[in-house]
Image (spheres, rainbow, N blue to C red):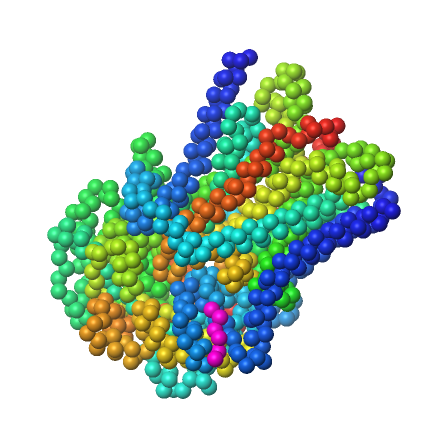
Amino acid sequence: MNKNMIIKNFFIYIGLIIITILTIFPLLWCLSASLRSDTEFYKYVTPFSINTLVPVDFTMDSYIKLFTKFNFARPIINTIFVSFVSIVAGCLLNSIAAFAFACFKFKFKEVLFGIFLVSFMVPFESISLPLYKVVSNLGWVNTYAGLIVPTIASGLVLFLFTQFFKDIPPSIIEAARVDGANWTQIFLKIILPSSVTVFVTASLIIFMDQWNSYLWPLLVARSKEIQTIQIALSSFKMERVTLWSCLYAGSMISALVPLGLFLPTQKYFVQGITSSGVKG
Amino acid sequence: MNNMFGKFKALPYIFILPAFLLIIVFKIYPIISTLLESLMVKGTFTLDTYETLFKDKIFWKSLWVTMKINIVMIPLQIFIAFCLALLVNTTVKGIGMFRTIFYLPVTISLTVATIVWNLMLSPNGGVINSILGIFGISQQDFLVSKTQALWCIVLIATWKGVGYWMMFILAGLKNVDASIYESAKIDGANWLKTVVSITIPLIKKVLLFVFVANTSINILLFVPMQIVTQGGPEGSTNVLMYEAYKSAFKMADRPRSAAIVTVLLVIIAIVCTLQFRLMSEKKEA
Amino acid sequence: MKKLSAIILLMAMVTTMFGCSGGSGDTGTTASQTSGTDSTGKAEKKEIVWMTETTKENQEILEAFEAKTGIKVKGEYLAFNDLFESIEIKIASGSEDYDVISVDGPMVAAYANRGYILPLDKYFTDDEKGQFIDSSRDAGIWDGKFYAPAQATSAQLLWYNKALLKQAGVTIRDNDENNRLTWEEIEDMAKKTVAAVDPDKSKGISGIQFQQVSRTYQMCALANSMGGKNIGDDGYTVDGVINNDAWIKSMTWMQNLYNSGLSQKGITADEVPNYFNSGKIVFMAGGTWTAAACDTAGMKDYGWTYAPAFKGFEKNVGTGTGSWHFGVNAASKNVDAAVEFIKYMSIGEGSDKYLKWSGDMPARKSKIQELIDDKNTAGYLKVGAYEASNTAVPRALTPGYSEYSSVMDATFENIRNGSTVKDSLNSAVEQINSAMAKYKK
C-alpha cells in the first residue's frame, strides 16, 4: 500500500513538473524580456541560446518607468476597483437569477434561460456600436458606471451558477421552508454556504473578464483617470516604435495581481466543501 | 422535481428580473440591432446581404477553416483541462502551488501570449525549432506556413485556455462528495473505471457548462489571427470571426459582418443544443 | 409574508446594484460634467476634444493654443491601431463628444465618403491649401473637396548597419539623388555581408528588411519604383493596375529575398526596428524617424542614403509617404473652434512647434525648404526632405483604402511567405473588386 502510494505520487509529480515547464516557459520569456533592454532582447531572441532567456545586462528600468513615467499604478487601482464592484454585483444578481432557474418551475423558463445563453454567444466586437449608443445616451461615457453596469448581468456566470445550484437537493430547501425559513434566509444560509466553490469560480470569471477587457474600456473609459490596465498596456504599442520591455513588464504585473487574488482562494479548492454535511 | 415551489408563481420572475433587465438593455437590444443590420439595406428589409455572402467563396473557405480549428480545439482543450483537473485534485504535497502555476497563463492577456508564442515559433531558429533541431528535425515555418499556422494557433489558444477550464472542472470535482470515491475504492474499481463511470456522471452539469462556454468562446476566437497571421498564409487561418471583424472594422461593411455573426450564432446554438441534449439525457442517473 | 421577504430581498439587491453604480458613477460624472458643460459652448471658456494617436501627446502646444485663443483642447490619446476602431465605432455612432479627429492620410477619402468629417473649403483659402506639398495637399482632398489639412508627412530612405558592412569589408559606392544605388547592388552587398558576418546562418542576420514589411505604406513603393501605380485614377480600378508587370516583377524580387534566405520571414513590422537596432539587419528601408529610434536604443552604427532604384528604372523611384491629417467630426457642435485649432496645428505656430518637437517631416513647402537650406539640419532629414518632395508616391486615393490596405497587407505577407506572386495579386484584385462593389451602387 505504502509502496504503491510512493510510486503513484512519483508519477503525479513527473506529470506536474512536465506541465509546469510547458506552462511556465513562455512566461519566463516575458519575465526575461521585461528585465532587459529591447535591443538586447532582440539580439538574442534567435537563434535560441541561454541568453535568449537570461539577461546579459539585467535592468529594472522598465518597471521603474512604468510607475514613474507611465503612472501605471492608476490603471491597476482602477481595474481592481471596477473588477471588485463587478464581482459583488455580478455574483449577487446572477446567482439570484440562477437560483430561480435551478430550483423553480415556471412558464417561459426555457425561453428566458435561452435569452441569457444567447447573450454570451455573440461576439462583443459586433455589438459594440449599438451598445456604445446606449451607454452614451445614458451619459455614462467616461464613468465607472459605463465600465461596470453593462457587464454585471452575464449569461455565462448565470449559467455556471445554475449548473451548480441544480445539484443542491430540493429536500434541504423544502425542509428549511417547513422550518419557517424565508427566502433570504434560505439563500444566505443554505445556497451560499454550499456553493462557496462556485462563487469563487464565478468571481474568477468576472474578474478575468474585467481584467482582460479591452475594446469596451477603450470606448467608454477614455480619460486617464479611469483608464484600465489593458488600455494602459496597449499604449506601449505606438505607431513607429513598441516599448516591448515596458509591455512585458506591464504584463508581468498584470499577471501578478490576479495571482494575488487567486492564491487566497486556494483553500476553497483544497477540500471539497460538500463534506461539511450540508449535502446528503 | 421542482413542483413543490409551484405555489410561488411570481417569485422566480422577481428573482430573474434585475439580471434580465440588464441583459435586455446591454446585450439583447444591441444584439438584435446588430442582427437587423444584416437584414436592412437603406431602410428596407432584404436578404441581399445573405445572398451575397453565400455566393462568396471566401465565406465558405472561412467556414471550413472555422470548423477545422474548432473540431480539434474544443475537444482537445476540454480533454486536457479534465486531465489537469484530475491531476491537481490529488492531494500530494505542494499541489496548491502547481494549481496556481497551471492557472498562470490565464492571467496573461491573449495579445501578449500571442506575441511571445510568435517569437518562440520563429522560423529562423526560434526556441521550438532549436528544440526540434536536437531531434534532427529540420526548421519548420510554423505560423508562416499555410499548413501549420492553424495548428500553431490551436497550440497558443490551448496553452492560454486550459487553466481556465481546469478551474471549473476542479470546482465540480470538489463539489462531489469524497465518500463516493471511497466506496468505489472499496468496491475495487480501477482508476479509469472510477473516472468514467463515477466521476464524469457526477460532474456532468459542470462539464456541460464547460462544453457550452468553451464552444462559444473558441468559435469566437480571433485575437491571434488579428495579431500575427491576419488570417493568412493564404487564408489558412481566416476563421469566420476574423472575417466578421474585418468586415466591420476594415472593410466598412457592417451588414456583411452582422450576417457572418448571425451564421456564427446559429452554429454555436446548434452545437450547444446538441451538447445540452447529449449531456442531459441521463441527468437523473 | 413570504412575498414580502422576497420583495425585501429584491430591493436589497437592487439597492446594492444601484449603490454600486451610483457610487462609482460619482467620480465619473464629475469628469463628464466638466466636459459636458464646456462642450455645449455656453460658457465663455470653450473646450474641444481631439481624438488622436498616442505619440502626438504634447501638452505644451495645447496650452500655448489655449493661451492664445482661450479655447481649451482636451486630447484623447489612443494607440495607433485602436484609433481606427474607435473612429469606426464612436464617430460612426454619430457621437458629438469629439470635435477634431486625427485622420491617417489615406483614410481621408473613406471618412469623407462615410460622412464622418466635414469639408473645409470654406475655411481654407486656396493660398492656405497651396502651402502644403502636393502629395500632402492631395491626400486631404476627396471628390474635389478639401477635407483634411496635414499635420506632417513622412519620408523613406535607405538605412544600413555600418559595423556589419565594415566587418565584411563591403563599401557603399558614392551615390546621390541623381546617381542612386540600385536594389540589385544592395542585394549583392547584402549577400556578401551576410556571407561574411553570418556564414553558417547561426546569428539570424537579415540582408535586407523593410521597416513596415507587409504594409502598403512601404511595400507599394517597390512596385512604384518599377513604374507601377497603386490604383486607377477613378479610385476604384485595380485590375491591370496592381497585377501588371511592374507589380509582378517587383514582388517576385521581394519574394526572392525571403525565399533565398537572405531576409528572414516571420518578423512582424512591429519588430523590424528592434532587429535593426540589435544589429541583425544589414540594409533596411525605413523612415526618417529611424535615426531617433536608433539613438534612443543606443545603436550607433547606422548610416543612411537615398532610397534605392531598380536597375533600368532609375527615373521611376517611388517612396512611401503620408502621415496624419486633421478632420472635423461631422457631428461636432464646435466647428469654428475646431477649425481654429486645426489651422493652428497645420499651418500656424502650433505646426512649427510640433515639427520642432517631433522631428516629423513637414508637409508644408516653406518648412521643407527651411530643412534643406539650414546647415544644421541632420543629413537624413535633408535626404528625407528631398524624397518627400520628389519621389514620394501617396498611397491609393480611394474611399475603400481600408479595404484596399487590408487585402494588400495580407497579399504582401502571402508573397513574402512564398505564395505564387501572380496568383496572389490576381486574388487581391478579385477581393478588392468585391469590396469596392458597394461604392459603385
- Against A171, residue C136 (above or below) is below
In the image, residue C74 lies in the stretch drawn in magenta: yes
Q: Nearer the viewer, residue B132 or C28?
A: C28
Q: Residue at x 56, y 32 (%)?
A: B85
Query: Is the C terminus of chain B in the top left, top right, bottom left or bottom right quadrant?
Result: top right
Task: Tell me the quarter of the picture where residue C362 sits.
Answer: bottom left
In the image, residue C107 lies in the stretch drawn in magenta: no
- Against C62, residue B65 (above or below) is above
Query: What percent of the width, then of the height, locates residue C368?
Result: 28, 76
Q: Residue at x 53, y 31 (%)?
A: B96
Dominant secondary structure of the residues highlighted in magenta in the image = strand
Query: What percent of the width, then of the height, locates residue C343?
Result: 41, 80
Q: Residue at x 34, y 79 (%)?
A: C132
Task: Tell me the quarter of the picture where residue A176 sits.
Answer: top right
- Against A151, residue B252 (above or below) is below
Q: What residue range appears in magenta?
A: C70-75
Q: Nearer the viewer, residue C158 or A65?
A: A65
The answer to whether residue C171 is visible is yes
Query: What percent of the width, then of the height, locates residue A279?
Result: 73, 30
